[in-house]
C-alpha cells in the first residue's frame, strides 16, 4: 500500500504519520502541498500541526493549496483519505467533511490521552477494532470542538457517519470524558461515501507501547485489511 503524507507549511505531525504508516507496512512518502498530483497512491493522509500558522482559523488557508484539488479528486474516486487534527480541520474547510472545528470550550490548548468509542465498525478505518473496545489515543489541539447545525447532526446520526465519540475508559460517554465540548461527544466523522475520515485524536501517536498506547494501530490495521 503506497501512502501520501501531505505536508503544509506548519505541519508538525508529518513524521509521526509517516512512521505510523511505515510501521504498518505502507510505502509512505511526503508530498509537498504545492504538488497537484496524487496518482499512484492508495491513501492520502493529512497530518496534524498548524498549517499556515492557523492564521484566520485552523485549516482555512491550507484548503486553498494546490494539493487540495488533488485530494478532492482522489476522494471522488473512492480512495481513502485520513485527516488527523489539523488534517480534520482542513477537510472541513475544504468541504470534504461536514461541520466545523471551533475553539475548545475552555479556550485552552489541550494535550493529553483520551478514550474513544468506535461507533461504526463497518468502515475501512475501523473494521479491525473489536466491539466494545475503548481506544486510548492522545489529543493535542486548541480548536477541536466539533460543531454542526441540528439538521446536519441528524444526518450524521441517521447515516452512521459518526465514527468516534469521546468516552471514558469503560467506553461510556459522559460530559467529563468530553475534553473540548464537542457536540454529541463527536471525535471523528466520515463522509457519506465512507472513504474520507476526519478525527481530532492522534492515532499515529499511539502506535508503540513506549508511547503509552498501541491502540492507534487498530485504525491503520483496518486500512491495511
Image: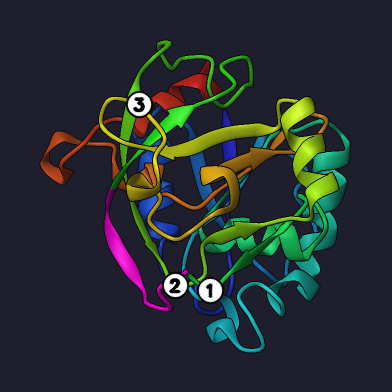
Task: Name the spot of residue 150 as percent of width and height, x first.
Answer: 79, 49
Q: Give coordinates of residue 158: x percent, y percent.
A: 78, 26
Circle 1 Cα neighbour tier, 10 Å, few/some/many (<14 / 14–19 / ≥20): some
Residue 66: in magenta span: no
Q: The magenta stretch spans which residues? A: 105-113
Give me the residue at 11% from left, 41% from top: 210
Residue 74 image point, x, y percent: 81, 43
Question: Quadrant of residue 8 in the image?
Answer: bottom right
Disc 3 to disc 1, C-alpha distance: 25 Å
Check disc 3: other Cα within 10 Å, few if <14, some if 14-19, many if 20+.
some
**Separation of residues labelled 1 and 2 (CA atoms):** 6 Å
Q: Which one is in front, 168 or 199? A: 168
Crowding near the residue tagged with mark 2, few <14, some 14–19, many ≥20 C-alpha atoms within 10 Å: many
Q: Secondary structure at mark 1?
A: loop
- CA–CA distance between discs 3 and 2? 24 Å
Question: Would you name the residue on which mark 1 appears?
Answer: 103
Asked where in the image residue 139 lies, by quadrant, the reply is bottom left
Mark identifier at residue 171: 3
When the figure is inspected, residue 37 is found, relative to residue 8, above or below; the finding is: above
Asked if one can make out residue 194 in the rendered structure from this viewpoint, the answer is no
Whether 109 is drawn above or below 147: the answer is: below
Sequence-earlier tag: 1 or 2: 1
221 lies above or below 83 = above
Q: Residue at x 83, y 57 (%)?
A: 95
Q: Is residue 143 among the parts visible in the rendering? A: yes
Q: Residue at x 64, y 81 (%)?
A: 57
Amino acid at each position: 500500500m503506497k501512502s501520501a503524507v501531505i505536508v503544509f507549511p506548519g505541519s508538525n505531525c508529518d513524521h509521526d504519520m509517516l512512521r505510523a504508516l511505515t510501521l504498518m507496512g505502507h510505502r509512505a512518502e511526503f508530498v509537498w502541498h504545492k504538488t497537484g498530483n496524487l496518482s499512484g497512491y492508495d491513501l492520502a493522509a493529512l497530518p496534524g500541526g498548524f498549517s499556515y500558522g492557523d492564521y484566520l482559523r485552523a485549516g482555512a488557508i491550507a484548503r486553498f493549496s494546490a494539493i487540495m484539488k488533488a485530494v478532492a479528486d482522489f476522494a471522488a474516486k473512492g480512495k481513502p483519505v485520513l485527516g488527523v487534527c489539523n488534517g480534520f480541520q482542513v477537510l472541513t474547510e475544504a468541504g470534504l467533511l461536514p461541520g466545523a472545528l471551533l475553539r475548545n470550550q475552555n479556550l485552552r490548548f489541550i494535550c493529553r490521552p483520551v478514550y474513544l468509542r468506535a461507533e461504526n465498525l463497518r468502515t475501512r478505518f475501523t473494521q479491525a477494532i473489536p466491539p466494545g473496545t475503548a481506544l486510548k489515543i492522545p489529543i493535542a489541539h486548541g480548536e477541536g470542538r466539533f460543531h454542526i447545525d441540528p439538521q446536519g447532526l441528524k444526518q450524521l446520526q441517521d447515516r452512521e457517519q459518526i465514527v468516534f465519540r469521546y468516552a471514558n475508559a469503560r467506553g461510556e460517554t459522559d460530559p467529563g470524558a468530553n475534553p473540548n465540548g464537542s457536540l454529541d461527544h463527536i471525535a471523528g466523522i466520515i463522509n457519506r461515501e465512507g472513504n474520507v475520515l476526519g478525527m481530532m485524536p492522534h492515532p499515529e501517536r499511539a502506535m508503540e507501547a513506549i508511547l503509552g498506547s498501541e491502540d492507534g494501530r487498530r485504525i491503520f490495521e483496518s486500512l491495511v485489511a
